[in-house]
Amino acid sequence: DLGLDSLARIELQGKIEALEAAQMEIAQKERLERELELARQVQQSMIPRTFPTMPGLTFAASYAPARQVGGDFYDVIKLDDDRVALVIADVADKGMPAALYMALARSLILAEARQFDAPETVLRNVNQLLMELGEQDMFVTVFYGVVDRRRGTLTYTRAGHDHPLLVRGGRVEALDGRGMALGLFDAAEFVMSQEVVAVRPGDRLVLFTDGLTDVVGPDGGMPNRDQLVARVQACAHLPPAEVCRAIFDDLTAYRGETPQFDDMALLVIGVE
């Protein structure tokens, strides 16, 4: 009997320990979910929901992280009465680490944009700061451009980011320019060019992250860049908010029930 009692006690103790371990795991999961929700709220607060008022320019955006938090971001920064900075960026990761790096990169870009006029200077300074902070295995691609509505120009730099699209008279042109992602190379190795293009009434600028071409359909296929260009071309005559809606609706339909693979961000600017 004593032997049986000992076995029963051992068995009971094992069940108690298993129950305690399960409860601890549930508590840890709940704590992680709370932290993720808090991170999501903080990140969402950093994604602009309204844009500055600038005569002759209209702004709209759509954003969908692949997880609760993501690494894509965009911004529209009013520099003065005539100039506005456009930003879109993609951190090379997803989830919490990307969200933290995104917050850092966005804050640095905002601070440098307030101090320096030249887009190239802004991004070179941000790159140097990211290098000094030394986040391992993290980097961010960025397009940063300044629209001067009086001069009718867009001055920009493209730090390893997807080529934005300029739509004019039904034709779509990819904005060129050389540049490396930020946070990988120090000043001695870092390469970047600054470009200038004219912007005219009726133009549309379409800035996006690669999540828009990394959508996976039910058959495992992915839309290529030409398909995205065709979508943009087909709806570019619409107001920017409707352009965003049409493109995201198309991508949602293409994906069907397949889970979203990558963060998606889209910023459309209309020149009126």
Image (cartoon, grey):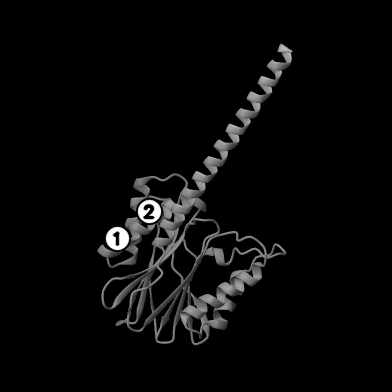
Label 2 neighbour load within 10 Å: few <14, some 14-19, many 20+: few
Q: Which residue is mark 2?
A: 104
Q: Quadrant of the C terminus?
A: bottom left
Query: Viewer-nearest of labels 2 and 1?
Result: 2
Give the number of callouts: 2
Q: Quadrant of residue 254?
A: bottom right
Q: Quadrant of the N terminus?
A: top right
Q: Which mark is residue 112?
A: 1
Q: Is residue 16 left or right of residue 3?
A: left
Asked whether residue 266 is in view, the answer is no
Camera-nearest residue between 3 and 191: 3
Residue occupying the far front of the picture: 1
Mark 2 element type: helix
Which amino acid type is shown beneath numbered disc 2? Leu
Rendered location of residue 60, percent (x, y): 44, 75
Asked whether residue 42 is in view, the answer is yes
Rendered location of residue 110, percent (x, y): 32, 62
Query: Is 70 located above or below residue 146 in the figure?
Result: above
Rendered location of residue 53, percent (x, y): 33, 78
Camera-nearest residue between 112 and 48: 48
Q: Is residue 183 left or right of residue 254?
A: left
Query: Is 213 located above or below residue 127 in the figure?
Result: below
Q: Earlier in the sequence, mark 2 or mark 1?
A: 2
Camera-nearest residue between 24 and 238: 24
Residue beneath the point at 37% across and 73% down: 51
Rendered location of residue 171, percent (x, y): 52, 83
Measure the alpha-carbon separation of dots 2 and 1.
12 Å
Residue beneath the point at 50% across and 45% down: 32
Which amino acid type is shown beneath numbered disc 1? Glu
